[in-house]
Image (spheres, rainbow, N blue to C red):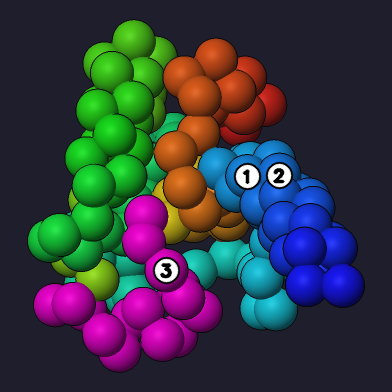
Amino acid sequence: MGSGAVGIVLVVGAAVGVRHRRRDSRLAAGDGPRHDQDVTLDPALLTRLGVGPAPATLLQFSTAFCAPCRAVRRVSTEVAALVPGVQHVEVDAESHLDEVRELGIWRTPTLLVLDSGGRVVRRATGVPTKPHLIAVLGEVL
């Protein structure tokens, strides 16, 4: 009975892990309780976060000891350099707790893709792939 229970726990754990990994890092619309695809962020909030005017913005929330945050920074910086009109803004989540709470950021890294009007077009937790990020920006620009 003991080894059968361990086997079941391992299978269920693996299935949950695979599902989580597939869901993680997806640039999804409406990911989160407050973030539907058509949510437009307050211009004052964007200013506090250091977001300037641009056709598209990759707004990244990171923390100091987050290893995946470095990967998101690398991918986002490379994409911003490749795609004209895209800015990458990285925000230290610990230094902007009020804004993080207001935006419903529960983990890092979280990446918001914003259009020129400050509308959240996509949201991802984890590390998105460069091709997927470029494709999403193609929809925005």
Q: Which residues are magenta?
A: 94-109
Local crowd size for mark 2, using a 10 Å CA cut-off: few (<14), some (14–19), many (≥20): few
Q: Residue at x 59, y 23 (%)?
A: 132
Please identify the quadrant where the N terminus is shown: bottom right
- Label 2: which secondary element: helix
Q: Is residue 55 visible?
A: yes
Q: Which residue is mark 3?
A: 107
Q: Residue at x 36, y 61 (%)?
A: 108
1 displayed left or right of 108: right
Question: Is residue 68 positioned above or below 75 on the image?
Answer: below
Question: Is residue 82 positioned above or below 42 on the image?
Answer: above
104 displayed left or right of 61: right
Query: Is residue 104 on the magenta stretch?
Result: yes
Please identify the quadrant where the C terminus is shown: top right
Q: Residue at x 42, y 68 (%)?
A: 107
Q: Position of residue 121 (x, y in %)?
A: 63, 48
Q: Which residue is mark 1?
A: 21
Q: Earlier in the sequence, mark 3 or mark 2?
A: 2
Q: Earlier in the sequence, mark 3 or mark 1?
A: 1
